[in-house]
Image: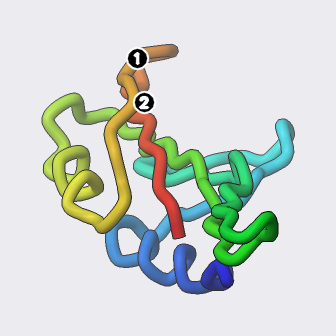
Amino acid sequence: MARPRSELSSLLHTFCSNVYFQPPADKKLTYPCIIYSLDALNVLYADNGPYRLHDRYSITYITRDPDDENIRKFVMLPLCKFDRSYSSDNLHHYAYTIFI
């Protein structure tokens, strides 16, 4: 069984105090911040039936500092991988995928 989203939220708060789960478009964000959302449900099967479920989340860390020390800390989390980075409106975005 997948672990609850609250565990991921608590973990992300150790990196940054501004953590948002699927914020609405009109939400004013404070930077640096973390935005995360459920990306997929990964079901493992055995004997023609599901036996394990992992939730896959997309995490985006947004900062004004391109050399922020947190960008390397995320990949040290279990089952987390770096996907891509990009810049927009003088903000640096770092995207990750994590399974919990």
- Identify the amino acid type marked 1: Tyr
**Residue 20 screen position, x and y as percent:** 65, 60
Which quarter of the image is occupied by the N terminus?
bottom right
Relative depth, front residue between 41 and 63: 41
Q: Indicate the position of residue 62 as horizontal and vertical percent values.
A: 44, 39
**Residue visible at 65% across and 75% down in the picture:** 52
Q: Identify residue for label 2.
A: 93
Q: Residues within 10 Å of mark 1 (few under 14, many from 20)?
A: few
Q: Amino acid at mark 2?
A: His
Residue 13 tag number: none
Numbered label tally: 2
Residue 31 appears at what percent x and percent y? 46, 47
Q: Nearer the viewer, residue 94 or 41?
A: 41
Residue 74 as seen in the image, left or right of residue 83: left
> Could you classify mark 2 by the number of other residues whose Cα lies within 10 Å: few (under 14), some (14-19), or many (20 or more)?
many
How far apart are labels 1 and 2 at the CA level? Answer: 5 Å
Residue 10 relative to residue 92: left or right: right
Disc 1 designates what residue? 86
Q: Earlier in the sequence, mark 1 or mark 2?
A: 1
Instruction: Give the image quarter of residue 15.
Output: bottom left
Give the x, y percent position of residue 76: 20, 60
